[in-house]
Image: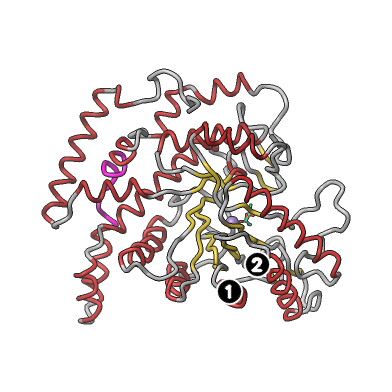
Amino acid sequence: MTKVFTGASFDPSANVEVTRDHERDLASLGERLERRGVALDREIEAVRQFAVAVPSWALGTGGTRFGRFPGAGEPRRLSEKLEDAAVVHRLTGAAPRVSLHIPWDVPDDTAAVRQFAAELGIGFDAVNSNTFQDQPGQLLSYKLGSFSHPDAAVRRQAVEHNLFAIEVGKELGSQAITIWLADGSDYPGQMSLRKSFDRVLECLRDVYAALPDGWRLFTEHKPYEPAFYASVVQDWGSSYLLATALGDRAQCLVDLGHHLPNTNIELVVARLLGAGKLGGFHFNDSKYGDDDLTAGSIKPYGLFLVFHELVQAERERLGGFTPAYMIDQSHNTKDPLEAMLQTVDQLQLAYAKARLVDHAALEAFQESGDPLMAERTLKEAFETDVRSLVAEARRRSGGALDPVIAFRNSGYRARKAAERAGADYVPQQSL
Ligand code: LRH
Ligand code: MN
């Protein structure tokens, strides 16, 4: 396996002091959990099984319409994105797959890319299609939509693109396609609200019919942007209607940032879980709109409550529950890799805390009508400091106790800045 990191510089366990403090914190947590009848080792092993996919498009600095401020040493092509994604897995032990975006990441040589990724110790999660931009040389524009476009030729072009994305994914070993449509309108009257939805379903049927064996199709809803009056797949209900009409291999993907302020996202998750239609997630956080901030940075309790729903489904071995956990963020001010390492840590923490809920006590308080004690039972888990548990899970998986500090100590970014000097990172650039 290609060594992502050379020398021992990255491994803080070389730092005796850090290790001693870690072991003391772990021992005291173990003692606390034992008093609750919870086995620390079982929890550590469970967190070691948690895995999330890294988005290829968030390994370089994101931006807004007002500007983008890229840092030195960012990936300029697919191979460098894979190298960086492997760093996240190396340091966390919890990011074994990358989610690619087509055509931004179309490989020149798919077999070579698959081989290179395997050497780096990573694979590929769901591919993402893109009919929200016009590519150089594209015949028909998506300005007025793709699957919902009034012109059947544009709809056909969009279907063809999704079939192409599936082909690329198939050769890379992906098992799913995520379809987010920017389709919508800016003004009342601009678009037929029902005809546009029917056309989207018709096109999705064509894509669904072409799914390779074992593949799933994820529909991703979003309330607005780039459409500022009506998005065709605006909310979980629209996504659910589509996934249900398509069939068993179609499920809904929940991007946490795709909900209007104060939406109860854990309730949306519970509804889709109950219907066996929760396909996966794009984890991130937001204060206002689709801000794509670091998961857990704004609403950590909200993230915990989402994981509380997921852990219950896991415990109940709920039918159709094979969620694809993926990250979807845009790092405008943080180093993209450091932000990704922080994100994986936040997700591991939320998962570990949700597993500590005393589910029997919670159910008893719910069934006996004791709201205060029911809430306290959740808060008890949320307020448990599980940082040493999660750090230990990473250490046992060969990762770092503190990935961000390990990354900074490694000098990786500086090395890449020297190595990758010259041509700036261009999203469309292939391998
Ligand atoms: C749309 C979205 C979608 C991706 C894109 C990069 O806002 O969440 O999942 O295709 O971001
Ligand atoms: Mn998304």
Residue 345 in the image: x percent, y percent? 39, 44
The quarter holding residue 147 reads bottom right
Q: Is residue 176 above or below residue 321?
A: above
Tell me the quadrant of the picture where the C terminus can be found.
Answer: top right
Label the magenta part by its dominant secondary structure.
Answer: helix
Q: Position of residue 415 (x, y in %)?
A: 55, 20
Residue 263 coordinates in the image, percent (x, y):
50, 70
Residue 370, image quadrant? bottom left
In the rendered view, how is the structure colored? secondary structure
Tell me which residue sits at (50%, 58%) in the image: 281
At 50% from the left and 48% from the top, the residue drawn is 53
Left or right, 86 with respect to 50, comes to: right
**Residue that appears at 60% across and 66% down:** 221
List the single residue furthest toward the front. Answer: 213
Q: Residues within 10 Å of mark 1 (few under 14, many from 20)?
A: some
Closest to the observer: 366 or 207?
A: 207
Residue at the spot of label 1: 247
Q: Which mark is residue 208?
A: 2
Amino acid type of disc 1? Answer: Gly
| Front one among 202 and 115 | 115
Q: Do callouts 2 and 1 mark residues in contact (Cβ within 8 Å)?
A: yes
Amino acid type of the residue tagged 2 in the rendering: Tyr
Position of 389 with respect to 54 (left or right) is left
Instruction: Give the label on residue 288, or none.
Output: none
In the image, the segment drawn in magenta is: 382-391
